[in-house]
Image (tube, helix red, strand yellow):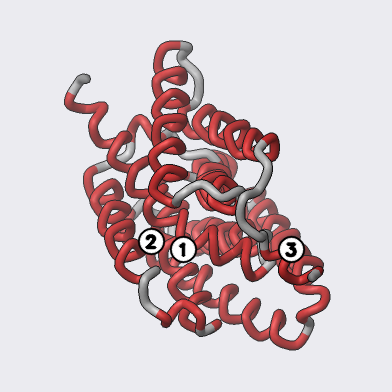
Amino acid sequence: MDSWFILPVLALIGGLLSLTFIGQNVLYRGVVFIDLAVAQAAASAVIWVHYFVHFESVWLDQLAATGGALFISLCIAQLVKKQSHHREAVIGLVYVAGACLAMLGASQNPHGREKLMQLLAADILWVDTAHAGTLLLCGGLMWWLQQKPWLKNDWVFYGVFALIASLAVPALGLFLVFSMLITPALWVARGIKTWIAIASSIGVAFIGLAGSWVLDLPSGTTVAITLALWGIGSLAMTPTTPTPETKRSS
């Protein structure tokens, strides 16, 4: 393996370690759209900051993404608390509003469309050391944090989720972040051990990354599609543990 290929591999490992445990909580809480809404808020914030501040800065992008994600996640936490029976509908509307705001911002900026495409489907092959290292640190944090009772608290969960999503979106893109969040969690929901779900998803992500390199395809999009297909494949397996939906209906 070429040395430059190590960084995208580490970014994929860090992303899956960071997002799998959050994905399990997302499925259990029944707020699947929250990732799209929060990630889209992060992307929208970056787009509009670039509209007002005309220079490229990784730190500026990260501050904007974190601020947007935290704001929307806390708003969603409050909305879901008041509208628990229609939470997915409410979160879906928040996502649509965020996506439209991002498109409006992109239309007003000469380089907005390119920035928006980068935030939706980042090119993992060119991820830098800072982003790969940050994702690995987040993965270690979530591995430790998921054993603590703190994530049961709504405000802690939404805050941690917003922080990690805002760090992952600039490096991985919205589509890949969502695939990483949901795919391993679906396998865990079918009764597979968490570490097996993560390891198999990492292997599938490597296949997608290698395929994008060999076929000269956009890496973020290719890996996201590969993971999405792997997640859909989990539906062919009969659950061996009760799912949240089964628990609610019983």
Element type at marker 2?
helix
- The residue beneath circle 1 is 65
- The residue beneath circle 3 is 245
Instruction: State the residue at coordinates (65%, 38%).
Output: 237
Q: Is residue 31 above or below residue 1?
A: below
Residues marked 1 and 2 touching at CB (< 8 Å): yes
Quarter of the figure with residue 74: bottom right
Task: Give amino acid for label 1.
Answer: Ala
What is the residue that sits farthest to the top in this orientation? 215
Residue 2 shown left or right of residue 235 in the figure: left
Quarter of the figure with residue 233: top right
Viewer-side label of 1, 3: 3
What is the residue that sits farthest to the front in this orientation? 240
Task: Give amino acid for label 3.
Answer: Glu
Quarter of the figure with residue 83: bottom right
Image quarter (top left, top right, bottom left or bottom right) of the N terminus: top left
Instruction: State the residue at coordinates (32%, 56%).
Output: 139
